[in-house]
Every structure is written in C-alpha cells, then in structure tokens.
Image (cartoon, rainbow, N blue to C red):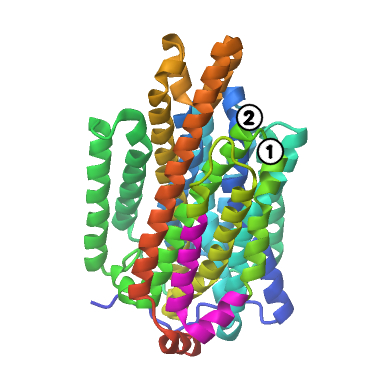
Amino acid sequence: MEKTQRTSAPPTAGAPPGLLRRRVVLAVMCVALMMIVSMVVGLTVALPGIAADTGASQSQLLWIMNSYGLVFAGFLLPAGALGDRYGRKGMLMAGVVVFGVASAMPMWVDDPGTLILLRVVAGLGSAMIMPMTLSIVTTVFPSEERAGAVAVWSAVAAGGALMGLLISGALLEAFSWRSIFGLSVALAILSAVLVLAFVPTSKDPDELPVDVIGAVLSVAGLCAVVYAIIEGPERGWSDTVVLLAAVGGVAALVGFVLWELRVEHPLLDPRFFRIGAFAAGSIVIVMASVATFGLFFVMLQYLQWLKGYSPLVAGLSLMPMTVAVGAVSPLAPVLVRRAGLRVVLTAGMIVIAVGMGVLTTLDKNSSYLPVLVGTTVVGAGIALCLAPATDSIVASLPAAKQGVASAVNDVTREVGGALGIAILGSAFNSGYRAGVGDRGDMIPGNTLEAVRSSVDSALATAERLGGATGARVADAARTAFADGMDRAMLVAALIVAVGAAAVLLLAPGRAESIRLQEEKQPEG
C-alpha cells in the first residue's frame, strides 16, 4: 500500500525567492512561536498570584497549566494535517485569532474553573499555530539553509520561553497576573498583522484526505493518560476514575498505532520511528521537555514561596540558564559534524540529568548557589540537545513529508511539556502531601486539610494562626514543599538518564550523521 505523498509539485511552491524575504518570514514565524512558548512558561511565575486571587488549589493550579499543554499536544497532529491539506497560512491565522481571543477573556475572570476552560481554548489555538511555524520555515528555506533556520527556530523555542518568563516577572512587579494575558493579546495582534503582510500561502499539492479516526484516537489517548497522571496523587492511584483513564488512554494510543499502520494516508506513520535519527530526535525532545517544563513549574514556586523572591527576581534567577543556552547553542552543529549525532545527543542528555541532580540537594534553607549551578548546567544540556534533535527529525524525512516532520517535532515537544508538568507536578504534589503527613503533629487537626491542599493555603493558614503555632505550621509546609521539589527533580533526572540510554542505542554515529546532512535535499 502506497503511503508516501507524490512529489509532482514541490512543497515550496509560492515561497519567497529572495534571501531577505526568507529571513523576514523566519522572523515573523519566530514572533508567532515566541507568543505561544512564552505563555507556557510565563504563566508559571504568576501561579502564586492566581492562587491568591482565585483561591485555586494545588490541583487546580496544575490544571491551569496542564489543560493548555494537554490540548496543545493532543491537537498538534490534526492541526498539522489540516494545515497541509487546506493551507498553512490560513491555519496559522485561524490559530492566532483563537489564541488571542482565549487570552483576552481571562483578564476578566475570577473563577479557576473558567480559567481552566479558557486555557483549553488557548491550547487549541496554539496547536494550530506551532506546526505551521516550523513547516513554513522548512518549506521556505532551501536545503542548504534549512539547518541554520531550524537552529534559529529551536533557539526561540528554548530561549523564548525564558525570555517570556523574565517579561512576565517584570509585568508582575507593576501589575497583576492578568497583565500576562494582556501581553499575549498584544503579541497575537502583532503576529496577525505580520502574517498577513509577509507570509506566503502554501499547502500540500496532493490534496490527501485527513485521517479523522487517527486524530480522534491520538487526542483521546493523550488526554486520558495525562489526566490519570495529574489526578493520581489527588484521587489516589487505585481510584476507579484514574485507573479507567490510564487503561483507556493506553488502549486508545495502542489503537492509534494499529490504525496508522493500516490506513492509506496516516496522520503519522509509525514506521518513521524505524529511522534511527528520527526516533532519537523525538526521544530527546520528549525527555528534555519533560525535564525543563517540569523544572519551571516547580522551581518558580520554590523561588517565590520558599525563598520569598518577587516574580521579577524569580525570573532573573533563571536567566543564567538562558545565557548557557545562548553560549552553547552555536557549538552544537559543530560538535555534531565532528563527533556525530549519537555522542552529542547522549552527552546533552547526561548534562541535563546532572543539572537536575544538583537541584535535588535544595532544601528550605538553601542559598541561591545550587539553583544557579543546577539550572545553568541544565541550560547547557538543552543547548546541546534541542537544535540537533529538531534538525535530525526534519532531515530524516523527504521534502514532501516536511509537514509531518514539523508536526512530529512539535508533538514531541508539547507532549513532553505536558507530561513534564503532569509527572513532575504530580511527583511534587505527592511529595508535599507526604511531607505534610509526616509532620502532622506540628499542625492543628482542624487545619490539616487546608495545609495539605497547597503551600499557598498552608502559609495563609499559618499567618491566620499566628504566634508559635503559626510558625510551626509555616515551617512544616516549607519543609514539605522542599521534600516534594526534591522528589520531582530526582524523577526528572531519572527520566532524562533513561532517555540518554535510549538515544545511545538509536542515534546514528558520525558517518551516518554526515550522510544525513549531505542527502538533505528537497524532492521534486
């Protein structure tokens, strides 16, 4: 059964011919990309303010983050396929509008449930945007320029998140958490204007049908599995709802793979994962995203609630990570050419795991030094990994499959981000609750449930109690918070270490890496 697209017309038809125009298009795609990745991380610095204003519990704070990432990840493949089928520019514009509207409405919302729902809609808009940005870049640039353009895109995907964190922290110094949504609206308006003015129209010349059944199975499977991960610590892992979600999600994902193997025009052909560079790149992006997104979610709460940093200072505290990314990123392509993809990707993953290991040493009384060292090491590892991993995915597939390659890159990144917040957030949540339970003798019985619900609630309870009792409750909560964070960082280090072992087995060596670069030519 034929499963590849025909190449009678090049996918870059209609692309701007001039170098200056190509660079303008790349800049526009980076603005749109910055808009959505900055929101993912930037909102984490506002979680204490959101909890205070809306009364959101720790579980609801997780859902405010995860509802966005979950829908984002779940709908990337269908959105990528629809963009290839009906037009990438149109899909990109539709996504910008949906994202902008969903970002405007939270500025007038006080209810956590409504905020979660709006984050779902914003996630859908982001899923329509992100695969289009990379797909447009890879179709506009010729093969000899593509690696450099992809490296710029990857740098914005990594560094843009941290820049969004800093900007969000600065906004929170003067305004409430709602100002972060106002920034997203402004970026959405700017993106819409630039896309209309500069981005060419393109789509797959072969109008292939969209795999609706595959889309439904992938969305259902991802949503159910991540729901189980999030709710496990809250409901208990033996809870009927959690078990049904986990089993049903895994079954849907297995069904997705089986369906994709037999359908004529699959949403994602699982056979692509037989390509070593493709599989290794996907694993790296998933594992690195699990670690980094989970790191931001937990670390920003640690810096604000335990260290007492303001949102701006918390953001600045993580900026050395951005410096490390910027300093090491230019070295990654050079190292790949000299040592091969296997060595560079494995080394990058090991460096990330080491950085996470440093962060497991933090407690409620730690200085800033281990935070500085740990996050800087993590940033260096990310810089070694992400651009080569993205380029290996794109380079592994022919030009007619660039839409698929872009969607897979984005899916792995966003699935990793969603799972990172879910897994590490859940590890932190369970560790915090266990820590509170271990110190139950320090907490009055009638306040125990409030203390268990979140550290914000615990500190508010301690302030209300006052005196020696309040001081004991606050100390117990902070110690339990540090316990939970250490558990989350340990889980992250183990996940990345497992990923490093898998990459060592799958990634191509130096000779194969060079061949991939030399054969990365468009079809048609």
Q: Label 2: state its secondary structure.
A: helix
Question: Secondary structure of the magenta portion, mostly?
Answer: helix
Res 110 visible: no
Looking at the rendering, in which quadrant would you find the N terminus? bottom left
Q: What residue sits right under mark 1 in the picture?
A: 311
Report the residue at 50% width, 77% height from top: 11
- Name the spot of residue 518 as percent of width and height, x first: 49, 90
Report the residue at 61% width, 76% height from top: 331
Q: Amino acid at mark 2?
A: Gly
Q: Is residue 343 magenta?
A: yes
Q: Amino acid at mark 1?
A: Pro
Q: Is residue 285 magenta?
A: no
Nearer-the-camera pick, 476 or 1: 476
Question: Label 2 crowding class (10 Å Cα cut-off): few <14, some 14-19, many 20+?
Answer: some
Relative placement, left or right, of 189 versus 80 is right
Whole-angstrom CA distance, mark 2 to mark 1, is: 10 Å
Q: What residue sits right under mark 2 in the picture?
A: 49
- Name the spot of residue 90 as percent of width and height, x first: 56, 59
- Name the spot of residue 156 as percent of width and height, x first: 63, 62
Q: Which residues are magenta?
A: 331-355
Q: Label 1: state its secondary structure.
A: helix
Q: CB under 8 Å between callouts 2 and 1?
A: yes
Nearer-the-camera pick, 144 or 462: 462
- Up the image or down, 212 lies above or below 263; here it is above
- Up the image or down, 37 lies above or below 325; here it is above
Quarter of the view holding residue 247: top left
Residue 431 badge:
none
Point out the frontmost of discs 2 and 1: 1
How many marks are shown on the rendered structure? Answer: 2
Report the residue at 23% width, 44% height from top: 248
Report the residue at 69% width, 66% height from top: 27
